[in-house]
Every structure is written in structure tokens, then in C-alpha cells.
């Protein structure tokens, strides 16, 4: 009957063989599985064959199991060499054929001797290969070598214990044979080896899983980055195209409209028409700027406004005081905001020059974190009270409307005879953090 | 201080404007001969054969940009005062003209009196300088802190302290008379600084172009 150990080995072999194909470790596992199968499975089969075959046959078969077991074991050990030695493979294969043949051909009496001799030969072969293996790997994989030696020692110990527990004392020669051929020794060896292989396989499997998981995460990250970049790229492309289109419109406006307006300005006799033409040209330039212009630093915008306003007022002999408060910082005005504020400022200054009869003007700018304020004050005659004149001549409603468009406010305070105060508040977008 | 103007060139493609400009300069500079051109080609030909004291150059012409004429003037007749007369008031258009060596600029649609005033001023040696132009000039010279500049065999073109100060103040929005008061200098001195700034801008721009050409030439070998 099959012993418990043999059954356990069979189960182990089964598990190992069913583990799936492919890597170096798995080849080892397969070889191992085959070895165990041959060893234990073979033994079990033979034991069952007792019932069918004569004793000599079963004895022969049992002994013959040695050769393939040894061949497979040596093949397993070959897996640890840098390169498999073909001659060894051929030798062991040959032995598989020779051993049963020799036993069969020899007469009954010599069979036991021959079998023992073969057993010792196999043992020596196995030990020799093992020794070479140890020597090769001693420097690089010392821990593994120690473990292998320990396994071998354990196996031999099992054999010795078995031998000592035998019902009769065996002679020395037989002891050798016993050591080489003892089932418990081999079983111990195979079980220990199997456990170690399985644990190594488990570790490798876990590592593979971990690397596969991290690869998956990396792929997800990479595709997220690609998507983000694509979205950004598409956005930039849209902006570029819009920009190009705007510039084209701006250039067309400039060339066609500008030339015609200029001709009007210089060839008409009527001063009012000429002035209107000039204002139209000014407007056109501003519109083009608003369409195609880039954002402007608040500090630069204030400088532009100051230069223009101060020189205009000076020319009309109006004393001008311009003061700045607060830090313009890195605030950016969009081209549109710049243009609209310029229009409001120009309108206010136009009124000052044409209608206020003022001799002095105070302009102050105040930059705060989220808005900037402009106030224009003069000592002129103030605004007339009638609503009608207000709208028609002074463009006040357009100033208010423009301020509203920028989400700001334009307030005009005045009383007839005591000057005018124009206050403009423009909200600023938060400066972009780079 | 003012230069005697006896030969004037007007480059403008719109006929009415050209006639108007001719009438204007004849008034300011009586007795001067005025040559007219409507295309860049014609203007360059004229500059080769005749010598002018003043040239009024439009920028947008059917067969090219007035900047080419200014370039050619600078090379052949450097004493000609080239003044840009244009619709554009932004530094994008004006800066290249100034780099090429223009003396100043006038906006076309301004009232007659203003243009007369400005031309007279320029003739007296007071070119205009707006904040946006000043910013561009500062940026141009700011980037010149590169090691490339000293390689050339030209006089070192960097702004003096004073010139830098003037530029900075203009960039902040102060007018030239105000700056004169702030720095305790006369109008003429300030005007001289501005002329120097424009000259240096022209020289350093040309040097940059020459260096680039040289490098490309070397590259081609």
C-alpha cells in the first residue's frame, strides 16, 4: 500500500505540475514535478502491479525507477549551471536504458548485487554533480548553497535514522547502498526541495503582480498626461487661430478704412468734418488695438495715459497735477480693458479741454489689489443741468456704458459753476501665479 | 540749431495726402525743392541720385515698407533726416523704423498746426519719444547684456547713465519738459539725449543685423 509520504509527494507533484508554464523557475518546477511523479508515482504503480505481475518483474521495475529519477534529478541540477552539459544528459539517458537491460539480462542471483552497484553509482554521480554545482555557485549565491547542503544533510540524516531503525544491522557496504537508495532519504530531500521551490515561486509571482500593478498605474498616469497635453494643445491651437483671424481683421480695417478716413480728414474744408474724421481714425486704431492687442501691464498703461494726457493739457495751457498711489505691481489689463479705459479717459479730457474752461486739473490714480481707480477733477464751469445737452455733447452715457462693460463704475459729479469730478473704478483680474 | 532744409523727399502712396504734405512742407520750409514718390522702388532710386535734407516716409506702401527706404538712406546719405509719417501709433510699427534710423515720427491725421509744430521741433533737434517706444528701447538695450556685443569692432553701444534715466522716466509717463525740470537739465540737453538714444538704437540694431549675417555666412561655409 502506498505510504503516507508517498501520497503526500504525489499531491505535491500534482500541485507543482499544474502551475502554469514559461519562466526559468517554472521549468525547474516542472522538472521537479516530473521527478517526484516518477519516483513516487512509479513506486505506487509498481506496488499495485504486485497483484498482476510476478515478484521478479515488480522488483525489476522498482529498481529500474532509479535511473529515470536520477536522470531527472541531474537534469534539475543542470538548470543551475550556466550552460547545460549535453554529455551529462546523454549519459543519464543512456543509463535509463542500460540499467533495466542489465538487470534483466543478468541471472537472478547477481541481480541484487547489480542493483546495489547501480544505486551506488547513481549516488556518486548525483553527489559529484552536486559538488560541482556547489563549487560554481559558492561565491555568488552562498545562502542558496548553504541551504542545499542543509537539505542534503537532512536527507542523509533521515536515511541513517532509517538504517539504524532497521530490524537487522546492515553491513557497511549495504549502508552505503542504503544511503544512496533509502526511500526516506529521498522523500525528505524531495519534500524539502519542493517546499523551497514553491516558496520561491510564490515570491516571484508576488513580484510579478506588483510590477504589473505599478505598470498599470504608470500607463494610466501617462495616458492622463497625454490627454491633458492634448487638451492644452487644442486650446492653444484655437487661441492661435483666433489671434490670426483677429490680426487679419485688424489689418484689413487699418488699410481700407484708415486710408479713406485720412483722405476725408485732409481734403475737406469743413473743420467739424475733419475733426470727426480724426476722431473716427482714433477710434479705429483703438478698436484694432482691442481686437488684436496683447494684454498690457497696468504700470505701462498708466504711463501711456499720463504722457498723452499731460502733453494734451499742457498744450491747452491747463495746469495739470498727476499723482499715482499704490503699487501697479504685475497686474495685467486685457487689450479690451486698456482700450475702453483709454476711451473713457480721452472723453473726459476732451470735455475738460472743450467745455469746462478750466485752468487747472487734478488727476489721481490709485492701484489696489483688486481694482484701480482713476479720478479727474477740474476747476471749470461744471456740467450744465439739462439732461439733453449732457448726453449729446459730453458722451457721458457712453462713458458710463463703457465702464459697465468692464464691470466697473463711472461716476460724474458736478455742479454748474464749481467744477467737475469724474471717478472711474475698474476691477482687476487676480494676477496669475506662475 | 535748425538745419537748413532745401531738398525734401515725400514718400506716400495716397495722392491727396501726398499733395497735402507737399503743401505743408513748402509752407514750413519756403524755397525748398520737393521730390515725390509713390512707391518704395521710386523712392530708393531718387535717394541714389539726389541728396535730401529731409524725407517724409510713409510706412505702408503697395510695394513694400518705408523702412527699406530709411535703411537705404542711412547707408547712402546719412545726413538726411528721415521722419516717419504714418497712421499707426503703436510701437510695433514705429520701432522697426526707429531701429532703421528714422529721426522721428508724425501721426498723419493730426491737425495741421500740430504737424507743423512737430516738424519744426524735429528740425530744431527735438525728436519725439513716447512711453511705449521708450519701453521698447529699454528692452532692446536690456537684452544687450549678452556677451555677443563686445565681439564686434564697433564702438561700444551702450546707454549712458543719463540716457537710461531719461528713458526710464519717459517709460513712466513723464513728458520731456517735465524730465528736464526733474533732472535740472535744459530742453536742448534732453533733446540731445533723445537723439543720442535713437542713434545708438540704430547703430546697435545694424550691428545686430551685421553680426547675424556674419554668423549665417560663416554657417554656410
Image (spheres, coloured by chain):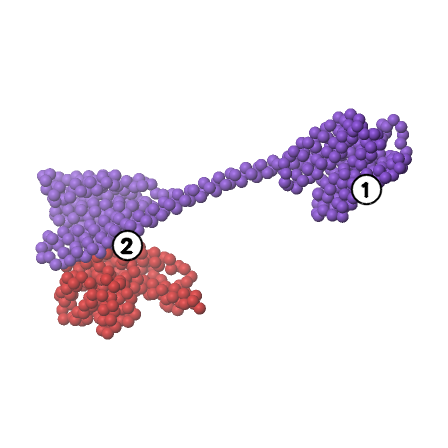
Chain colours: A purple, B red
Residue in front for this viewpoint, A376 or A50: A50
Residue A149 position by quadrant: top right
Q: Which residue is mark 1?
A: A98
Residue at (90% x, 33% y) in the render: A171
Q: Which mark is residue A275?
A: none
When the figure is inspected, residue A137 is found, relative to residue B151, above or below; the finding is: above
Provide residue A201's location: percent of width, then percent of height.
65, 36
Provide residue A153's location: percent of width, then percent of height.
79, 35
Q: Which residue is mark 2?
A: B132
Residues beneath discs 2 and 1 located on the same chain: no
Residue at (82% x, 36% y) in the render: A180
Number of callouts: 2
Quarter containing the N terminus of chain A: top right
Q: Chain of mark 2?
A: B
Provide residue A314's location: percent of width, then percent of height.
18, 53
When the figure is inspected, residue A330 is found, relative to residue A115, above or below; the finding is: below
Residue at (24% x, 60% y) in the render: B60
Provide residue A13's location: percent of width, then percent of height.
70, 32
Residue in front for this viewpoint, A284 or A172: A172
Residue A369 position by quadrant: top left
B159 left or right, relative to B26: right
B116 left or right, relative to A427: left
When the figure is inspected, residue A170 is found, relative to residue B77, above or below; the finding is: above
Q: Secondary structure at mark 2?
A: helix
Amino acid at each position: 500500500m502506498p505510504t503516507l509520504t508517498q501520497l503526500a509527494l504525489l499531491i505535491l507533484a500534482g500541485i507543482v505540475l499544474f502551475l502554469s508554464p514559461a519562466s526559468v523557475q517554472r521549468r525547474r518546477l516542472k522538472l521537479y514535478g516530473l521527478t517526484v511523479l516518477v519516483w513516487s508515482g512509479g513506486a505506487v504503480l509498481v506496488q499495485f502491479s504486485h497483484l498482476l505481475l510476478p515478484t521478479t518483474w515488480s522488483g525489476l521495475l522498482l529498481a529500474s525507477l532509479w535511473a529515470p529519477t536520477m536522470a531527472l534529478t541531474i537534469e534539475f541540477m543542470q538548470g543551475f549551471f550556466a550552460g547545460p552539459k549535453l554529455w551529462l544528459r546523454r549519459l543519464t539517458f543512456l543509463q535509463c536504458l542500460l540499467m533495466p537491460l542489465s538487470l534483466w539480462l543478468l541471472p537472478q542471483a547477481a541481480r541484487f548485487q547489480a542493483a546495489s552497484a547501480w544505486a551506488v553509482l547513481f549516488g556518486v554521480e548525483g553527489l559529484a554533480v552536486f559538488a560541482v554545482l556547489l563549487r560554481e555557485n559558492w561565491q555568488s549565491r552562498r545562502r542558496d548553497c548553504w541551504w542545499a547542503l542543509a537539505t542534503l544533510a537532512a536527507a542523509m540524516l533521515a536515511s541513517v535514522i532509517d538504517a539504524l531503525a532497521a530490524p537487522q544491522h546492515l553491513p557497511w557496504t549495504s549502508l552505503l547502498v542504503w544511503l544512496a537508495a533509502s526511500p526516506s532519504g529521498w522523500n525528505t530531500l524531495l519534500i524539502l526541495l519542493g517546499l523551497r521551490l514553491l516558496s520561491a515561486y510564490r515570491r516571484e509571482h508576488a513580484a510579478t503582480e506588483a510590477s504589473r500593478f505599478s505598470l498599470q498605474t504608470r500607463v494610466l498616469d501617462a495616458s492622463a498626461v497625454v490627454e491633458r497635453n492634448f487638451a492644452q494643445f487644442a486650446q492653444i491651437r484655437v487661441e492661435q487661430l483666433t489671434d490670426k483671424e483677429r490680426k487679419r481683421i485688424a489689418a484689413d480695417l487699418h488699410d481700407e478704412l484708415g486710408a479713406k478716413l485720412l483722405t476725408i480728414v485732409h481734403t475737406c474744408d469743413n473743420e467739424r468734418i475733419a475733426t470727426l474724421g480724426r476722431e473716427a481714425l482714433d477710434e479705429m486704431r483703438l478698436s484694432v488695438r482691442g481686437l488684436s492687442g496683447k494684454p498690457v501691464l497696468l504700470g505701462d498703461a498708466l504711463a501711456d495715459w499720463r504722457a498723452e494726457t499731460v502733453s494734451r493739457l499742457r498744450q491747452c495751457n491747463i495746469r495739470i497735477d498727476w499723482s499715482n498711489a499704490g503699487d501697479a505691481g504685475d497686474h495685467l489689463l486685457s487689450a479690451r480693458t486698456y482700450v475702453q479705459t483709454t476711451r473713457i479717459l480721452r472723453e473726459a479730457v476732451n470735455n475738460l479741454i472743450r467745455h469746462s474752461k478750466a485752468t487747472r486739473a487734478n488727476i489721481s490714480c490709485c492701484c489696489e489689489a483688486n481694482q484701480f481707480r482713476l479720478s479727474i477733477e477740474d476747476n471749470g464751469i461744471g456740467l450744465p443741468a439739462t439732461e439733453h445737452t449732457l448726453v449729446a455733447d459730453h458722451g457721458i452715457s457712453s462713458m458710463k456704458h463703457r465702464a459697465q462693460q468692464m464691470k466697473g463704475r463711472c461716476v460724474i459729479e458736478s455742479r454748474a459753476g464749481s467744477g467737475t469730478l469724474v471717478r472711474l473704478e475698474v476691477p482687476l483680474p487676480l494676477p496669475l501665479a506662475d | 540749431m535748425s538745419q537748413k532744409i532745401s531738398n525734401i523727399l515725400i514718400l506716400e502712396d495716397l495722392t491727396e495726402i501726398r499733395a497735402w504734405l507737399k503743401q505743408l512742407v513748402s509752407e514750413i520750409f519756403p524755397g525748398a525743392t520737393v521730390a515725390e514718390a509713390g512707391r518704395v522702388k521710386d523712392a530708393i532710386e531718387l535717394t541714389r541720385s539726389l541728396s535730401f535734407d529731409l524725407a517724409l516716409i510713409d510706412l505702408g506702401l503697395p510695394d513694400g515698407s518705408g523702412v527699406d527706404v530709411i535703411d537705404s538712406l542711412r547707408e547712402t546719405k546719412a545726413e538726411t533726416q528721415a521722419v516717419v509719417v504714418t497712421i499707426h501709433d503703436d510701437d510695433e510699427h514705429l520701432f522697426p523704423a526707429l531701429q532703421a534710423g528714422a529721426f522721428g515720427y508724425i501721426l498723419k491725421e493730426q491737425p495741421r498746426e500740430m504737424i507743423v509744430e512737430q516738424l519744426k521741433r524735429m528740425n530744431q533737434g527735438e525728436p519725439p519719444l513716447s512711453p511705449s517706444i521708450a519701453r521698447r528701447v529699454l528692452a532692446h538695450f536690456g537684452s544687450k547684456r549678452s556677451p555677443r556685443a563686445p565681439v564686434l569692432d564697433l564702438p561700444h553701444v551702450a546707454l549712458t547713465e543719463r540716457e537710461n534715466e531719461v528713458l526710464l522716466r519717459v517709460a513712466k509717463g513723464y513728458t520731456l519738459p517735465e524730465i528736464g525740470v526733474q533732472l535740472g537739465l535744459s530742453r536742448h540737453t534732453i533733446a540731445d539725449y533723445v537723439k543720442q538714444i535713437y542713434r545708438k538704437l540704430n547703430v546697435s540694431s545694424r550691428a545686430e543685423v551685421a553680426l547675424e549675417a556674419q554668423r549665417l555666412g560663416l554657417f554656410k561655409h
